[in-house]
Image (cartoon, helix red, strand yellow):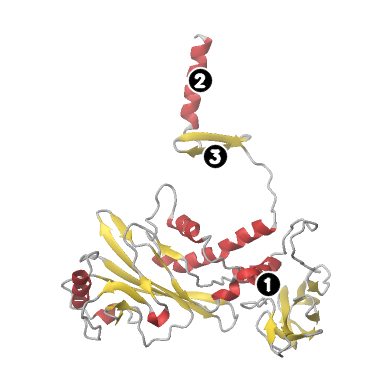
Amino acid sequence: MPTLLLNSYIMARLNGILTKLQESVGSFTFKQNGGQTVVSEKITQTTNAKTNGQQKQRMKWTNVIRMYQVLTPYLKLAFGGARNGRSDYNKFVSANLGKAPVYLTKQEAQAGASIVAPYEVTHDSIKSIKINGKGNQAVTDISLGDLAITDETTVKEFSNAVVQSNGLYEYGDQITFFLVRQEVNDVTMLPMAAVDACCVVLDKASEAKLLTVVDARGFSVQEGRLAALATHEFGDHGLVWIHSRKEAAKTLVSTQHLICENNLLKEYQGQAAYQRATESYGGVSDVYLRPNGVLNPVENSVPVAPSVEGKKTLRLSASPVNGGTVSGGGSFDKGSRVSISAVASGDYSFSRWSDGDTSASRTVTVNGDMSLTAYFTKTTSGGESSETNPDGGGGNLGD
């Protein structure tokens, strides 16, 4: 066979094989992109870089993933299901990674903490439900005509009011209500999220009592529209209504995000929250001599010897580092009761330990490796105190 034809034959055979490859072979990595095979040199060595930018990007993931886990039972098909190789999980993370960054410490993340934030929870082609106001003043754009929802209101009456008063709704459509409550665990003092969900299918024949099917907190009337219950105190939370429809073999949903009223959220945002979270992961490794206008002194920690076999380590630190001193850390037998103390310096006063305890001197039981931070507040000229680097939950967790 002539050389030119042989080469063409080999290349054709090779191309046929390569179009099926999506993995590393030898020193090359093969990927499929738009029907074409892209070949790149295989990366064989990586570094766990911890520059300021990289650390911040990584920490943005934590709360987004935790909130997805909380909402998972209700999010199937929330983003159209698996399309173009992307799952609902991929789409949820992608949609929310740049929204309202939340910074959890390493200990909080490992313990499953989560902060309710204004994340997008559904995304598809149905027109979004507009929501005005927050909490018990939240009102949708779903008109109910002259319907008053009472204990005697039926699903039929509600459905007729929605379909007849709104051109975008049909019988068979579903209206869903999510109430995502922000809670703090009484024992661990860690922030947690919990979901209350309910839904109703618009049915022109159902005589079932509406409020036996759905939650009155999300199915009430204000200004002639579907709204939150005006007399209910919601506390810290996020809420949303979702419109969905089954069309042929597909389930279509409206694009919606949580409407949040959460005082705890601001404690986990901003530079102070980011700094606290960064320190819990061991800090960043930016170039020390690079001018950036930020002074990051070494944490004022009690030196602790390497763990001895059979011993448990208690590590203590102060925040801010010039706010005071801590004592009592070290290596101890499991189950030991150890006295620790925090002493404020200068114009600072002791605020609390990272596990929520407010006693400057106390006794702790060392059942495993532990890390505790003493937080100090700086007293202003007016005699008031403001806590520096507040911690949103308990830090008394084993590494």
* Residue placed under numbered mark 2 in the picture: 10
Image quadrant of residue 176?
Answer: bottom left
* Residue placed under numbered mark 1 in the picture: 398
Q: What residue sits 39% from the left and 82% below the top? A: 136
Residue 183: x and y, percent?
A: 51, 79
**Is residue 199 among what the camera can see?**
no
Residue 185 vertical placement versus 113 (above, below): below
Foreground: 291 or 359? 291
Give yes or no for contact between labels 3 and 2 (Cβ–Cβ under 8 Å): no
Chain-order first, disc 3 or disc 1:
3
Q: Residues within 10 Å of mark 2 (few under 14, many from 20)?
A: few
Residue 37: x and y, percent?
A: 50, 34
Specify the farthest residue to the bottom: 383
Q: Quarter of the image containing the C terminus? A: bottom right
Q: CA distance from mark 2 to mark 1?
A: 59 Å
Asked which secondary structure carries label 1, the reply is loop
Q: Which kind of residue does numbered mark 3 sit on?
A: Glu
Residue 163 shown left or right of residue 38 in the figure: left
Q: What residue sits 31% from the left and 66% below the top? A: 243
Specify the farthest residue to the front: 381
Asked which secondary structure carries label 3, the reply is loop
* Residue placed under numbered mark 3 in the picture: 23
Chain-order first, disc 2 or disc 1:
2
**Is residue 169 among what the camera can see?**
yes
Q: Residues within 10 Å of mark 3 (few under 14, many from 20)?
A: few
Q: CA distance from mark 3 to mark 1?
A: 38 Å
Query: Which numbered tag is attached to residue 385?
Result: none
Q: Which kind of residue does numbered mark 1 sit on?
A: Gly
Chain-order first, disc 3 or disc 2:
2
Residue 163: x and y, percent?
A: 20, 69
Residue 354: x and y, percent?
A: 68, 79
